[in-house]
Image (cartoon, rainbow, N blue to C red):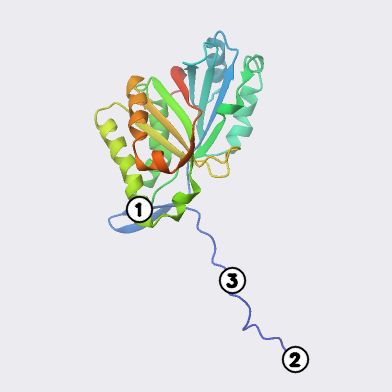
């Protein structure tokens, strides 16, 4: 006697985890993204040996002097392959002079580039632009921080969410048009020990505009009503960067 299969639930469709975009009205996708990892240290009186060590190890990234700690430094490293962080970067940071410094875990950040769904050039959005901005010699100052969005944001209607996000988009365009600030936005869902949702990097020639845009963001609906936490903020000035 045969058993009927008519009551079996249908097999789930294969997951498509690629990033989505839109070009000439047609959907596009790309299953690639850039990961970025930030690590901070204290107890570093002379940062030049750290810069030389990164250079000699062939690490791609930036070394910042911490504006709020006279013996602090921060390292931001991008890679399309997260294995890079637990192999080459781990080896570099596990040797002198970094072993003499004090690791500051409160500043640990790990995130990935992402698309919103309407970008016409996904390779530029996900891979080229974030790394290009990080390594650009035009931007000497940086503010990096994580944020945790309030869970109730996800219960808002989609059009309301879009209006809230568009408010921040308008700010970014205003500051970007004048060459004051460019941003790097990363998602860190599940990659952060404090359950943060995003990592934001604000980069510019001068420090004041980076502070000014944060001040303006305080007035937006998202920051004032739909964020659970913001920071800690790492404020750094570039000492060393690898070649673009």
Residue 71 falls in image quadrant = top right
Look at mark 1 in the image and give the residue it sits on: 160
Q: Earlier in the sequence, mark 1 or mark 2?
A: 2
User: 172 or 211, which is in the foreground?
Assistant: 211
**Label number found at residue 11:** 3
Q: For the residues marked 1 and 2, what is the alpha-carbon distance in whole angstroms?
A: 57 Å
Look at mark 2 in the image and give the residue it sits on: 1
Task: Give the residue at x 52% y 11%.
Answer: 70
Task: Give the residue at x 43% y 39%.
Answer: 127
Check the image and name the residue furthest to the bottom: 1
Q: Position of residue 142 (x, y in %)?
A: 42, 24
Question: Secondary structure beneath disc 2?
Answer: loop
Q: For the residues marked 1 and 3, what is the alpha-carbon distance in whole angstroms?
A: 34 Å
Q: Position of residue 174 (x, y in %)?
A: 26, 34
Which image quadrant: the N terminus?
A: bottom right
- Tell me if residue 154 can be seen: yes
Task: Give the residue at x 44% y 49%.
Answer: 153
Q: Position of residue 141 (x, y in %)?
A: 39, 21
**32 up-or-down from 88: above or below:** below
Residue 133 falls in image quadrant = top left
Q: Position of residue 44 (x, y in %)?
A: 58, 12
Left-right relation of 193 to 203: right
User: 143 or 97, which is in the foreground?
Assistant: 143
Left-right relation of 71 to 155: right
Q: Residues within 10 Å of mark 2 (few under 14, many from 20)?
A: few
């Amino acid at each position: 006697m045969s058993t009927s299969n008519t009551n079996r639930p249908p097999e789930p469709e294969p997951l498509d985890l690629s990033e989505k975009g839109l070009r000439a009205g047609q959907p596009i996708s790309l299953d690639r993204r850039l990961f970025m990892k930030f690590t901070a240290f204290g107890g570093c009186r002379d940062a030049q040996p750290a810069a030389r060590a990164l250079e000699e190890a062939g690490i791609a990234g930036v070394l910042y002097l911490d504006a709020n700690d006279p013996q602090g430094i921060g390292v931001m490293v991008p890679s399309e392959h997260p294995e890079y962080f637990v192999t080459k970067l781990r080896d570099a940071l596990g040797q002198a002079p970094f072993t003499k410094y004090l690791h500051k875990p409160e500043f640990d950040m790990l995130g990935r580039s992402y698309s919103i769904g309407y970008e016409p050039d996904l390779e530029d959005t996900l891979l080229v632009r974030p790394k290009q901005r990080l390594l650009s010699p035009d931007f000497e100052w940086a503010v990096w921080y994580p944020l945790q969005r309030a869970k109730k944001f996800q219960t808002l209607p989609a059009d309301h969410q879009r209006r809230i996000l568009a408010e921040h988009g308008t700010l970014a365009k205003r500051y970007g048009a004048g060459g004051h600030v460019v941003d790097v936005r990363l998602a860190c869902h599940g990659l952060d020990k404090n359950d943060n949702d995003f990592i934001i990097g604000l980069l510019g020639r001068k420090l004041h505009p980076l502070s000014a845009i944060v001040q303006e963001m305080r007035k937006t609906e998202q920051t004032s009503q739909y964020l659970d936490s913001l920071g800690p903020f790492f404020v750094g000035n570039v000492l060393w960067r690898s070649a673009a």
